[in-house]
């Protein structure tokens, strides 16, 4: 049985108890890449309606980014950008960006956070106002990067004939990115 701290209110915790909890948390955090890869794998069974699964869409997105020699942060962002669809369908970009933010460039996190709004440009059923919702960010330094991401690594990644690299190819990248020292700026 695992040791537990004695306090029931954090204000009552001792230095030793918090050091112990931090040690446990550090051990748990080493499994983050595994949990993210499992979330990616879960997209195999997600609802679809598209010609490919969301899992294949994610692999296609990452493969295209890799083949275009994007920086590793962008490739990993492309791979994981939709893993939040299962539990945050309306805010999945924000959810995934929050996971990525301590480990990737500000640009990669911003792109993932906003890609849903930028994707509306390609949705025929949306009103003109909805399709142009991304224009509210026109003056943002990563606006053009997000436009490019959505054009090259998202809206066009539903091709059943596209040859994707396997998830195992990207796993070392995920491990490198998510074993960096997190930055909380």
Image: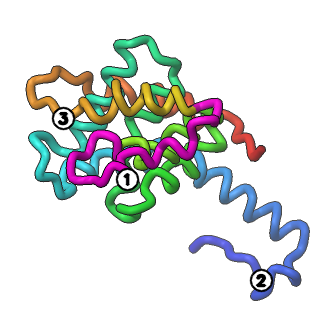
Residue drawn 32% across the image and 34% down it:
154
Mark 3 — residue? 158
User: Is residue 61 shown above or below 64?
Assistant: below
Q: CA distance from mark 3 to mark 2?
A: 52 Å
Which stretch appears magenta?
120-142
Indicate left or right for 29 with 42 as reference. Answer: right
Residue 143 in the image: state x and y as whole percent. 55, 33
Indicate left or right for 141 with 167 as reference. Answer: right
Q: Earlier in the sequence, mark 1 or mark 3?
A: 1
Numbered tag placed on residue 45 in the rendering: none
* Front in this rendered view, residue 6 or 168: 168
Numbered tag placed on residue 6 in the rendering: 2
Numbered tag placed on residue 130 in the rendering: 1
> Which quarter of the rendered picture does the N terminus lie within?
bottom right
In this rendering, the label closer to the viewer, 1 or 2: 1
Mark 1 and mark 3 in contact? Answer it, CB < 8 Å. Answer: no
Q: Earlier in the sequence, mark 1 or mark 2?
A: 2
- Can residue 127 be found in the magenta stretch? yes
């Amino acid at each position: 049985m695992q040791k537990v701290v004695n306090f029931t209110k954090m204000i009552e915790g001792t230095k030793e108890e918090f050091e112990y909890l931090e040690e446990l948390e550090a051990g748990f955090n080493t499994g983050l890449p595994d949990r993210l890869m499992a979330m990616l794998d879960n997209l195999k069974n997600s609802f679809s309606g598209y010609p490919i699964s969301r899992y294949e869409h994610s692999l296609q997105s990452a493969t295209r980014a890799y083949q275009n020699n994007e920086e590793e942060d962008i490739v990993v962002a492309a791979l994981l950008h939709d893993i939040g669809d299962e539990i945050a369908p309306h805010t999945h970009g924000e959810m995934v960006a929050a996971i990525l933010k301590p480990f990737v460039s500000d640009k990669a996190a911003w792109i993932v956070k906003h890609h849903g709004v930028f994707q509306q440009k390609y949705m025929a059923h949306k009103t003109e106002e909805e399709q142009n919702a991304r224009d509210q960010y026109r003056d943002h330094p990563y606006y053009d990067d997000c436009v490019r991401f959505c054009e090259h690594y998202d809206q066009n990644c539903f091709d059943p004939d596209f040859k994707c690299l396997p998830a195992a190819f990207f796993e070392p990248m995920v491990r490198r990115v998510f074993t960096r020292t997190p930055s909380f700026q």
